[in-house]
Image: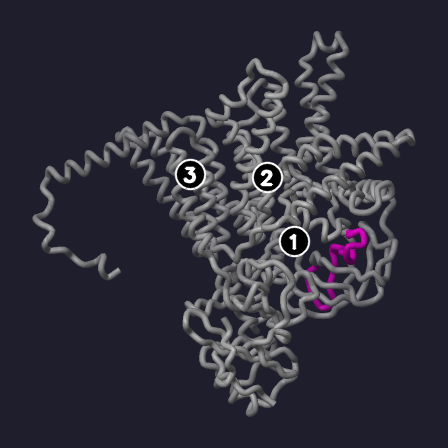
Amino acid sequence: MADPAFARSPPLPADSAAASVNHDAGPPLSPAGHCGSLARLSSVQRTIEQFLDARPFERGPWLAVGFGAGIAGWAALPGPWQWAALIALCAAAMVFAALLGRGTGADHTARAIMAMALMVAAGCTTIWAKSALVGTPPLALRQTAMLTGRVVDRIDTGGAGPVQIVLAARIAGVERPMLVKVIVPDALDQPGLIVGATITARARIGPPPPPMLPGAHDFAFAAWFAGIGATGSLAGPVTLIESAPPRPSLRRVQAALHAHVVAHLPGSAGAIAATLVSGDRGAIARADADAMRDAGFAHLLSISGLHVSAVIAGVYLLLLRTLALIPWLALRVRLPLLAALGGALAGVAYCLITGSQVPTIRSAAGAVLVLGALALGRDPLSMRLLAAAALVVMLFWPEAVLGPSFQMSFGAVIAVIALYGAAPVKRFIARRDESAVIRLARHGAMLLISGLVIEAALMPIALFHFHRNGVYGAFANLLAIPLMTLVTMPLLALALALDLIGCGAPAWWATGQSLDAMLWIAHTTASLPGAVTTLPMMPGGVFALCVAGLLWLALWSGRVRWYGLIPAVIGAAALAGTRAPDILIAGDGRHVGITGLGPDLVVLGETRGHLARDSLLQAAGMAGIPQALEDWPGARCTHDFCALALTRAGRRSVLLIAHSHRRIDPETLAPACAQSDIVIADYTLPASCHPRSLRVDAALLARTGGMTINLASGTVRTVAATSANHPWLRWRIASDGQ
């Protein structure tokens, strides 16, 4: 807690043990002891062989896990030498496995080691190669320049914020063309500013921003793999050089569908309906999006497996039932095959119309594999089919593995398949002679259990990426998912179909009522006491432990699967002990957060912008509205600086934080710095400023990026220390550090 006494505050400026040998341990082991050790080793080897031999169908999905682990290893390791070392280590493991399999009877073990090592190396190589081929070195410095280029994408927000466009542009003074993503202020927008148009305009641009804090969302990473080299905003009038050619395109179809839906369904319901049709989430009000996130069904706003599956299943069943009414066709053609083909085409069309985003493509690929299994009479709920779909996605979009969408969608499906593949669940859901009421109650119970299992599986992912998770998500989804898939989406499709003959008004009204009901569920659930649990930044090692344990639980069968509880419980215990850093300093130096001063995060700096405010709150694992440091009673502030004292673990630290850009006379500032432990400023402090522990100014932040400080342990984490050697940030650090 803060020390209320400010008499001492600064004046405000106008294993060695493992190597030891126990000589009393007795005589050395006898040859018989060596034989016993070899016998035990041989017994372990036989046990592993028997285990692998008994599970031929459960080994395959681990190959996809190995490929993903190679991608994660590339992201976790700092640079090319370490990536090459990982690949070399995998090659050595394959050589060792080949030697192990010679005449030892360990064929399964040897093949398992070789296969996993090969997949890890392949995953690391795949994302490394894509990074080298696709990644675009960003603009070196922030600047105001003239842009001339063609609009390749336009992102409308439906009034929720300014329009954004992506330009394939040439920048004055820069030799190479690049993709530039810029915000278009409302005053500069015009009807001709659409995809295909060629424009020129003045813009304030710079390299894509790195994470604001260690562990925060990395915009530079996303921009690197999207080929975007600069971001910013238009600052001058837009001159239309050439209008977009009048040819049809998917983007125009999406825009037309979006406008058509919004015209028939205004307000929040229309914004969500337009998202389901076109994939554009920009028009959804922030309050509604936050409520759905806190209620645990934000996934309903992202076109992914649920929506694609609903479309494909609806078309499959409709075709199957309709074609069965034609006797000639039903007697001569395999109707499931025709229905599967129609469902697959519908899924691909829906994927294209909604923007062909990676989650949608991933879901369409998985759904097509499921349709193929149904057409061939195979089990569609198979871990091997899911692993095949995951491999397809990872081959083409390896960077998706590192994002929450991939992890949460595949995690949810893995949880469902593992649950319904368990022997007790199979017995519970087996068909039996019973009344309709009991059958309905049994299915309802399974739906609730499925929701609870999915929530438990996805909680570590949600806490790692978003630092918050809805507590009542399983119960809310029990209502929201059937409402979306069985009511809203069929009604929306019916409304669009009836509009072709001009009588879709009743269907639009019903669609709006269903969406209003879903929003009511979201806001009601999110407003319940304790509806949201928050957590500070989760260490990567803890997240890896949780994921490894959950995968072990899901992918194996029998008693051995319960060994996965060991890493999962260890990770959960470490997670429960995670505490927020005491001080959070954004990379720009203008936003500083301080925890431990009460229930609210105390901040210095303007927090009207959602990005800065949300980043500070998420990193601290806190909710609510931040409290301004200037208004906190424990701080002493002047026009230029705020001073406060923090006591952590019995250690008192004095902070001096600048909150104006006015340079103070060095001779006046020096005594205050000398009596402070940490001095923070968003500009370069004079050389005469020497605090007792740490000086954080623009010069240091240009080299380190944002940072967090734990006063009790003296630990400082920086963006540069965790990811500055990666190509999308290495260019930024080098340019800013010059």
> Contact, CB < 8 Å: mark 1 with mark 2?
no
N-terminal of the pair, mark 1 or mark 2, is 1
What residue did someone put label 1 on?
227
What residue did someone put label 3 on?
116
Using residue 595 as the reference point, say whether residue 715 is left or right of it.
left
Q: CA distance from mark 2 to mark 3?
A: 35 Å
> Contact, CB < 8 Å: mark 1 with mark 3?
no
Using residue 663 as the reference point, say whether residue 45 is left or right of it.
left
What residue did someone put label 2 on?
474
Query: Which color scheme does this rendered protein use?
Result: one colour
Looking at the rendered structure, the secondary structure element under dot 3 is helix
Residue that appears at 86% across and 32% down:
506
Name the residue at the bottom extreme.
Answer: 667
Q: Is residue 420 magenta?
A: no
N-terminal of the pair, mark 2 or mark 3, is 3
Looking at the rendered structure, the secondary structure element under dot 2 is helix
Numbered range of the magenta stretch: 156-177
Residue that appears at 60% across and 25% down:
441
Placement of 732 over or under 270, stated as above or below: below
Q: Nearer the viewer, residue 562 or 175?
A: 562
Q: State how many labels appear.
A: 3
Placement of 230 over or under 345, stated as above or below: below
Q: Badge 1: how crowded within 10 Å, few (<14), some, or many (20+)?
A: some
